Image (cartoon, coloured by chain):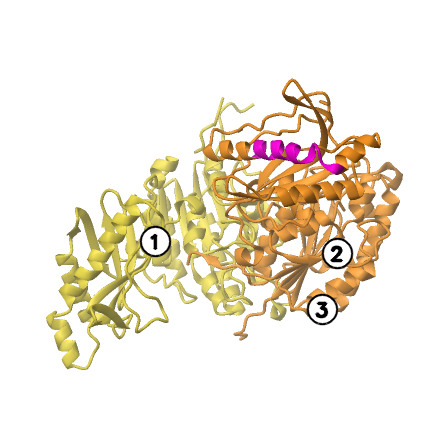
Chain colours: A yellow, B orange
Amino acid sequence: MKLVSREAKRAIVVIMDGVGDRPIEELGWKTPLQVARKPNLDRIAEIGATGLYDPIAPGIRPGTDTGHLAIFGYDPFRYYPGRGPLEAIGTGINVLPGDVALRANLATVREEGGKLIVIDRRAGRIRGKDAEDLVRYLAEHLREIDGVKVIIAHGTEHRVSIVLRGEGLCPYISDTDPGTAREGSPVKEAVPTKDLACARRTADIVNKLVRASYELLKDHPINKRRVKQGLLPANILITRGAGAVPKDLKPFKEMYGVSAYLVCEEDTVLGIGKLLGIEGEIPPGATGNLDTDISSILRATLNAIDRGYDIVFVHVKGPDIAGHDANWRGKIEIIERIDWLVGEVLKNLSLEEFIVSLTSDHTTPCYVRDHTGDPVPIAIAGIGVRVDDVRRYDEVSCARGCIGRVRGTDFLSIILDLTGKRKKWGA
Amino acid sequence: MKLVSREAKRAIVVIMDGVGDRPIEELGWKTPLQVARKPNLDRIAEIGATGLYDPIAPGIRPGTDTGHLAIFGYDPFRYYPGRGPLEAIGTGINVLPGDVALRANLATVREEGGKLIVIDRRAGRIRGKDAEDLVRYLAEHLREIDGVKVIIAHGTEHRVSIVLRGEGLCPYISDTDPGTAREGSPVKEAVPTKDLACARRTADIVNKLVRASYELLKDHPINKRRVKQGLLPANILITRGAGAVPKDLKPFKEMYGVSAYLVCEEDTVLGIGKLLGIEGEIPPGATGNLDTDISSILRATLNAIDRGYDIVFVHVKGPDIAGHDANWRGKIEIIERIDWLVGEVLKNLSLEEFIVSLTSDHTTPCYVRDHTGDPVPIAIAGIGVRVDDVRRYDEVSCARGCIGRVRGTDFLSIILDLTGKRKKWGA
């Protein structure tokens, strides 16, 4: 009788973005996963446990952001900060728990009877050096309002991120941007959307910030030059989508006592990782599309394994892109390339030491061309994993697996448990 | 490459009340669903996805009311208003979010040492014109107490519904009815069951109402006449089961952005629909029993489909009645008649346009003669639905299906997702 414990200590989580699908007539009413040749993905199913996974809940359509939050073990209902903070992270701002972040546009207004009327919400889609220089000028001259630190960063074209950091802030305020279809409307006042002192204070600061941006930009030399050139001046920031990172958000390592690394293909996923304190990279040549350099993703993965992280998350975006484009052939091909990647990973590690798992953030059916609320198949292999009789990794086969149907943070929880990282609750 | 989306836009939900069962010795330890000849129900299973559904949670016994709330997408833990509001809706009162409703009895009391002693909780099961006239008299003379609107309506026999509408009310109060086994006890004071100002106010109003009913009824000519005739006078209203419709209950259309119609067989289900703002009808000849006119239900269903509703719910009561009566033969027969109905529905619509689904509000086993917490089988067919290899619609076959086991509001969520009615959460 063996008296030492035999338990895997580490895990690989392969996230195939949007890989699930619905039956497609052109594939004989099968899904791309059911049609693709994928011996390595199927092997995980065959030697391990399978099931279905709803990153949020059955029938609820996840975004890439909410779906990944769930895979990383953070309940989206509790931790989803909204687009403001996620875009701010995308621009490189180190957003902290408690920060309020907003999306903003460089816009064009004219004064009319004491009001600021929006002529163009995007200042003629201003881009390049003009946009960068104006945003840098704002960032340098708007560092603080009423004791609150202001961080302003340029995104792409007219897009700007604003982060407010300080005491007594919260994101329950309305937009100053009058909205997509409202050119010719005045810039709005931000007002509290909840009757809270923090909301009144935040709205007040945002209104001051918008007004100050106008004062700083209206006579700026760049704008004077633009007007002479017949271009729209970018003479104000208008804001929308205030959001906050929950104050009690703990970094992944602190939350779960586990080190993690993220190899991924796009800024949204990298940004979610950053928010959670998960280190990561977009490997060179990883385009997030069907032409991605899958060997570069493999190299980054094997490197991360070598560096000793407890969990390595590997994200491949292609299946989602193919779903949005209704390109089922492309979806089959990228699945087959991911299969190659998984095969190579399996050659490089021992299933006595590693749990290897397959999952996804949501389903992106070719017939819908967007995310849906269908569950995604999951498969988990390695020592300690119960073995069911499912032999294929697809939406229908995995439904008969011994994991059943799980949701939200359950997936990560199972991985943590299989790698001995879960403490007993109770005695 | 196909660039348009192919997605069903509308749905039919067939609700077979209490259709699930447990093994019955007289059926060779099979269930009525396993024994019935039902090619059309089985066809839905065969061409679509199957699974199990717990309207509340595994092992929890739903009522027809809580079960239907869940099927209609309203979490019963959050939205169940209790019997008071549901019975008030049954009497025809238009109960609104925020209203507090109570069940009440016309009862007989006598004064004894300044107390009101209950002689008969049902005033000798008063019925007919006497009951109607006395309740109408109360309704006309008790329209308002302390600024709160009072609505009183007659149910059946001694049963009365009371609705209180106004500011600062809540349902956390005790009963004034001393209870079933307590004839000879005094009428109780309503007291707050939570230490809240709204509960104190509501209890005070109810106590005033009970006292006022006695003042109005004690010398009423009808009661004087009844006493002469040797009948018990109905000289007071005693109350129980205070409940409230949650203030944040949104109508179905507003909650889900979807129009729905309900063809059903009884007031409880119609009342739940009404509470949620779902239009509906009990078709002529729909008795809610085994002798129901199933073709009338079919006609109402096809009419609702023609009128363009996004979701048509069709409720058939018979299987539940047969379960309560331990009538397995009858249960098999009504299942076979529902099978005919589903077959006719399938002839009249396209599965490219419609999702057709089978579900139930709870299991009513013939051997228990009441509702149990067993899951119910579900089956869903139409374009976009994943196809598993289950070929029969019954409690055991569907457990192997590709939906797995879902609960609560999941069922409606899946239907909304399949008909493209779900918005993405996140990006």
* In the displayed structure image, the side of residue A362 where residue A221 appears, left or right: left
Q: Quadrant of the C terminus of chain B?
A: bottom left
Which residue is labeled 3 in the image? B349
Q: Secondary structure at mark 3?
A: loop
Outermost residue toward the top in this view = B113
* In the displayed structure image, the side of residue B307 where residue B37 appears, left or right: right
- The residue drawn where x is 79% and y is 50% is B288
Which segment did they paint magenta?
A: B206-221
Asked which quadrant contains residue A73, the reply is top left
Residue B234's place in the image compared with A280, above or below, is above
Which residue is labeled 2 in the image? B282
Tell which circle, 2 or 3, labels the residue nearer the N-terminal end. Answer: 2
Question: Gap in Å between the C-alphas at discs 2 and 3?
Answer: 22 Å
* In the displayed structure image, the side of residue B29 where residue A115 appears, left or right: left
The image shows residue B202 at horizontal and vertical percentages of 53, 35
User: What type is the residue that disc 2 sits on?
Assistant: Ile
Residue A380 visible to the viewer: yes
Q: Main secondary structure of the magenta part?
A: helix
Asked whether B218 falls inside the magenta stretch, the response is yes
Asked which quadrant contains residue B24, the reply is top right
- Tell me the subunit letter for badge 1: A
The total of numbered circles placed on residues is: 3
User: What type is the residue that disc 3 sits on?
Assistant: Leu
Residue A222's place in the image compared with B356, above or below, is below
How crowded is the residue under tag 2: few (<14 C-alpha within 10 Å), some, or many (20+)?
Answer: many
The image shows residue A293 at horizontal and vertical percentages of 38, 62
Q: Nearer the viewer, residue B230 or B57?
A: B230
Q: Secondary structure at mark 2?
A: loop
How crowded is the residue under tag 1: few (<14 C-alpha within 10 Å), some, or many (20+)?
Answer: many
Which residue is labeled 1 in the image? A270
